[in-house]
Amino acid sequence: MIAIYPGSFDPITLGHLDIIQRGSRLFERVIVAVLRNPNKMPLFSVQQRLEQISFSTRHLANVEVDTFDGLTVNYAQMRQAQVLLRGLRAVSDFEIELQMAHTNKTLSTQIETVFLATSNEYSFLSSSVVKEIARFGGSVDHLVPPHIALDIYQCYNQNSPMLNPITTEAMPRKSIPTESPMEMLREQEA
Ligand code: ADP
């Protein structure tokens, strides 16, 4: 059975990787599918995210990384997948995930959504949380794989806060970008 794990993965976190790892034990093949969403201004380009995910899952032989746009069920049908894999962290996830699963069922009765409950240690973790911490100078080394932490620090133009003994304290004001590079770019263009 082939499962699609769709999402933004901007960037992939240890929470996502936990779902991928556990999914890879349940399904013959897991396709991690990065959604190309023109309405969102991501921190990392689709190409960067594909590379980040490929590198993070290189030890899992039955995991593939791909990108798609449009309806997830159409993509799943095209890839002959029977399952949409999703992770559940909290009740707030449940409401929206259930609505999505029901909606997808009306589009294709052949495809089942399978939810994996988050591992306890990642129940608070999201890509947004990671970006928020990094943006204000905190360490994200415990939340994402090391190479992705470096990508994130580079994006916010910081050295790893682990080099700094005080990881939770705000960095000097002038070294903290208050906006992401993308936001600054947009403002300059406006
Ligand atoms: P989306 O833009 O679809 O929300 P995400 O990349 O944020 O994409 O998440 C993709 C999937 O991974 C979703 O099902 C989400 O609930 C799940 N997920 C995200 N973070 C975690 C986590 N820490 N533990 C378990 N599942 C997670």
Image: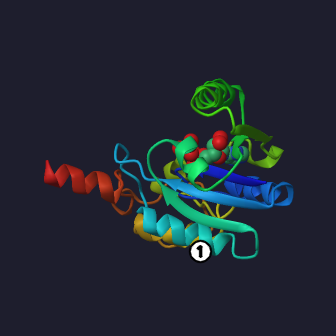
Q: Is residue 18 visible?
A: yes
Could you tell whether 32 is left or right of 48 in the image? right
Could you tell whether 10 is left or right of 140 in the image? left
In the image shown, does 36 or 129 lie closer to the viewer? Answer: 36
Indicate the quadrant containing the N terminus: top left, top right, bottom left or bottom right: bottom right
- Name the residue type under label 1: His
Count of numbered tags: 1
Residue at the far right: name it.
25
Residue at 72%, 31% in the rendered image: 90
Which quarter of the picture shows residue 109? top right
Where residue 171 appears, as percent x and y from the top left, is: 46, 59
In the image shown, does 100 or 169 lie closer to the viewer? Answer: 100
Residue at 40%, 53% in the rendered image: 42
Up/down of 112 relative to 7, above or below: above
Q: Quadrant of ligand 1?
A: top right
Residue at 59%, 74% in the rendered image: 147
In the image shown, does 148 or 36 lie closer to the viewer? Answer: 36
In the image shown, does 163 or 124 lie closer to the viewer? Answer: 124
- Residue that mark 1 sits on: 147
Callout 1 environment at 10 Å: few (<14), some (14 to 19), or many (20+)? few
Which quarter of the picture shows residue 52? bottom right
Could you tell whether 89 is left or right of 38 in the image? right
Where residue 166 appears, as percent x and y from the top left, is: 60, 62
Helix, strand or loop at disc 1? helix
Q: According to the image, what is the colour scheme of the structure?
A: rainbow
Task: Respond yes or no on whether mark 1 lies under 8 Å from ligand 1.
Answer: no
Q: Is residue 129 visible?
A: no
Could you tell whether 78 is left or right of 27 in the image? left
Residue at 65%, 67% in the rendered image: 64
